[in-house]
Image (cartoon, rainbow, N blue to C red):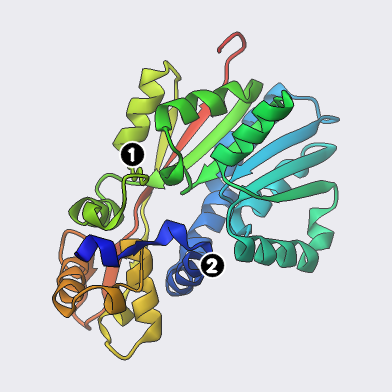
Amino acid sequence: MEQAKLKPLMYDPDYYTKTFHAYAKRSAKFQVLATWGDTIFPKQVVNRLVERFPADSTVRMLGIGSGSGEMDSKMAAKIRAHFKAVQNIVIEPAASQLEMYRKLIADGKEGFAGIDFDLREDTLDGYRRKLNETGVHPKYHFISAIHSVYYVDDLNDTIRYLHDCLEDDGMLLIIVVGDTSGFWNLWQRYARFQDKNSHYMCTQDLRDAFNANGIPFTVVRQASRVDITSCFDPESDEGNLIVDFLAHVCDLRGSGTPELHQEVLDYLGSAECSERKDDGTVLFNNDWDAFIVQKGKGQT
């Protein structure tokens, strides 16, 4: 059966890393996030932390699924510029991603003065289990989950848990794909590629989870496009990796039938997922939404 042959990407963290960086190389992902971190993040998060906490505070951060650290480390540095120190615990299941994060820290150590990075190879659910075993439940001033809540066991429970982990006046940032993005349309169209442990979601799912828990939030939409033209070149290894990342499966071309592979390519190139330019360039719709929460005093 088709489903039996296709291995979800989430079950191979190292291959995930390979496909992700092929995708990131062809996109402005890090550039868009960096620009967002320079413009929106200071206004929506940093300034609000500065208003609520004294400058001599050591800010405790929790990064969930922080990958190779490009955005996570930048946010830590932005916060550190206003406070005495930052303790940044990072939860990331892919060892290869953590290795890249460590290199990023080593290469830019002068810019990370006053920041203590604690990188842990784990999932959020695994991290929670370990804390429950020890009976220690730390609180954080800032928690981020950038394109990572897709892999939690229970979204409503996760939102409630992360909110509980915040200090009073602490900030929570969660970024997910938009509900009109190519990612969401593709994942819905080919939901059969994933197994029962997958919980793909979009903006509306996160809205529902926050509302169900009675947690106020702000949403900031970010438009983004990715050049996926190489996906349509049968000789492009990079293109194959990008297709695997977008579909979230391992080796779609080798594991699926030729007909299925072509069907996915046709859908990727359609108006449901992408824009086609006159010169043949195909731009994938990568729009995403940032959910921002500040925990009020007395909120549980």
Q: 287 or 116, which lies in front?
A: 116
Left or right: where does residue 106 sit relative to residue 218?
right
Say what amino acid the circle numbered 1 marks: Thr
Q: 235 or 182, which lies in front?
A: 235
Number of numbered markers: 2
Instruction: Write the residue at 33% across / 42% down.
Output: 201
Left or right: where does residue 142 sit relative to residue 111?
left
Compared to residue 173, the image places residue 1 above or below, namely below
Left or right: where does residue 45 sit relative to residue 8?
right
In this view, the mark in front (2 or 1) = 2
Instruction: Write the residue at 85% across / 47% down.
Output: 114
Q: Are marks 2 and 1 in contact (CB under 8 Å)?
A: no
Mark pair 2, 1: CA separation: 27 Å
Instruction: Write the residue at 55% across / 48% down.
Output: 39
Q: 261 or 146, which lies in front?
A: 261
**Crowding at label 1, few (<14), some or many (≥20) Cα neighbours within 10 Å?**
many
Q: Earlier in the sequence, mark 2 or mark 1?
A: 2
Is there any visible trace of residue 140 in the rendered image? no
**Crowding at label 2, few (<14), some or many (≥20) Cα neighbours within 10 Å?**
some
The percent coordinates of residue 97 (x first, y second) are 61, 63
Q: 157 or 108, which lies in front?
A: 157
What residue is pinned by disc 1? 203
For mark 2, give the secondary structure: helix
The percent coordinates of residue 243 (x first, y second) are 32, 71
What residue is pinned by disc 2? 14
Left or right: where does residue 35 sit relative to residue 204?
right
For mark 1, give the secondary structure: helix
The percent coordinates of residue 65 (x first, y second) are 56, 49
Q: Quadrant of residue 289?
A: top left
Say what amino acid the circle numbered 2 marks: Asp
